[in-house]
Amino acid sequence: MKNLTMFYDGLCPLCQAEIQFLSGRNQAGLLSFVDINSDQYSPERVGVSCKQALASMCAQYDDGELLEGVEVFSEAYRRADLPKLAWLFSRPLLKPFWNVAYRFFAKHRHTISAILGPLALRLVNRKG
């Protein structure tokens, strides 16, 4: 299975919580994460502007193939050994719903994250 690099908004607490959650489940080392607000993110290399990356979840395989939208989540969850979530996000009938929901979230991420982000981060950072 190819490595998948996910591009995320490091200024968004909910995004941070998702990345921390996936990082904790990345035992196979098949996921990498790059904050699009950091110097590590290169729009030229990826082929996606920061504005585009903020509007639609984006990820890239090591071979350069780009993924956008809900496919990113199904592939990330598969690599994080979360088969039920991977299955849920890969259902053809649900993909339009997930894509609309993510576009809504992306547009309002900072407002939504201000409300839900601190709790999500606390839950992810809880010591079992």
Image (spheres, rainbow, N blue to C red):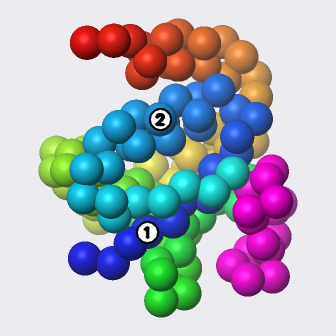
Q: Which residue is found at the position 47% from the left and 81% from the top? A: 62
Q: Which residue is found at the position 35% from the left and 37% from the top? A: 24
Label 1 element class: strand
Whether residue 21 appears in this view of the structure is yes
* Residue 33: quarter of image: bottom right
In the picture provided, is 117 more to the left or to the right than 29? right
Image position, residue 84 (x, y; %): 16, 45
50 inside magenta stretch: yes
Using the image, tell me which numbered label, if any, was put on residue 20. Answer: 2
Residue occupied by mark 1: 4
Q: Amino acid at mark 1?
A: Leu
Which quadrant does the N terminus fall into? bottom left
Instruction: Identify which residue, 70 or 1, lies in the foreground.
Output: 1
Residue 112 vertical position relative to residue 81 in the rendered view, above or below: above
First of labels 1, 2 by sequence position: 1
Q: Amino acid at mark 2?
A: Gln
Image position, residue 14 (x, y; %): 58, 29
* Residue 112: quarter of image: top right
| Mark pair 1, 2: CA separation | 15 Å
Instruction: Identify which residue, 79 or 69, lies in the foreground.
Output: 79
Residue 18 vertical position relative to residue 1 in the rendered view, above or below: above
Q: Which residue is found at the position 39% from the left and 43% from the top? A: 22
| Residue range highlighted in magenta | 36-52
Using the image, tell me which numbered label, if any, was put on residue 31. Answer: none
